[in-house]
Image (cartoon, rainbow, N blue to C red):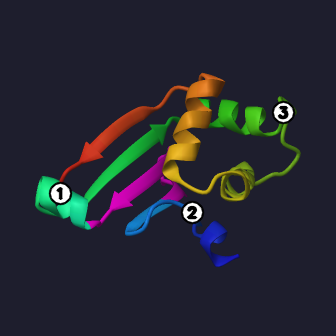
């Protein structure tokens, strides 16, 4: 799949006029992105907005382990495996966020009012 090779997958669910994705950045961080380009975002903020969750490389390994039911990954490309698991398990940013909170996996949340 091209998206996975590019270290990015689109999450297929979510609200109308929003988009969610997961991406592995060059520094190794996993970033879960939510973009809102709805009329509501336009009226409240004057433009599109984004909310990002950044998971560090160390916490990314913990996330992978928990998604694999605490088993160790046997694949060499754990980033590709992680992105596939995220794509298959979650349909939106908010589903990932709820799961991260339940699994006690730390992340940094960033709000971008000028997306």
Q: Given this view, does label 1 or label 2 mark the residue nearer the observer? A: 2
Please state the horizontal and vertical placement of residue 68, each as a whole percent of the image: 82, 39
Q: Which residues are magenta?
A: 21-38
CA gap, disc 3 to disc 1? 38 Å
Q: Is residue 87 above or below residue 66?
A: below
Q: For mark 1, what is the residue?
A: 114
Q: Quadrant of the N terminus?
A: bottom right
- Of the two numbered discs 2 and 3 on the same chain, state the one appearing first in sequence: 2
Disc 1 to disc 2: CB gap under 8 Å: no
CA gap, disc 1 to disc 2? 23 Å
Q: Is residue 107 left or right of residue 81?
A: left
- Of the two numbered discs 3 and 1 on the same chain, state the one appearing first in sequence: 3
Question: Helix, strand or loop at disc 1?
Answer: loop
Farthest residue toward the left?
46
Q: Is residue 47 left or right of residue 64?
A: left
Q: Is residue 88 left or right of residue 93?
A: right
Farthest residue toward the top?
104
Q: For mark 3, what is the residue?
A: 69
Residue 70 shows in this picture: yes
Residue 28 shows in this picture: no
Please state the horizontal and vertical placement of residue 80, each as a whole percent of the image: 70, 58
Question: Helix, strand or loop at disc 2?
Answer: loop
Q: Quadrant of the C terminus?
A: bottom left
Crowding around mark 1 (Cα neighbors within 10 Å: few <14, some 14 to 19, many 20+) is few
Q: Which mark is residue 13?
A: 2
Q: Given this view, does label 2 or label 3 mark the residue nearer the observer? A: 2
């Amino acid at each position: 799949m091209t998206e996975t090779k590019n270290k990015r997958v689109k999450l297929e669910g979510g609200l109308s006029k929003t988009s969610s994705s997961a991406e592995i950045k060059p520094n190794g961080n996993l970033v879960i992105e939510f973009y809102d380009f709805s009329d509501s975002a336009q009226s409240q903020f004057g433009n599109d907005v984004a909310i990002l969750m950044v998971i560090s490389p160390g916490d990314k390994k913990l996330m992978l382990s928990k998604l694999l039911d605490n088993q160790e990954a046997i694949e060499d490309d754990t980033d590709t495996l992680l992105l596939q698991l995220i794509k298959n398990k979650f349909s939106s940013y908010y589903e990932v966020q709820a799961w991260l909170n339940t699994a006690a996996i730390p992340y940094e949340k960033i709000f971008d009012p000028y997306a």
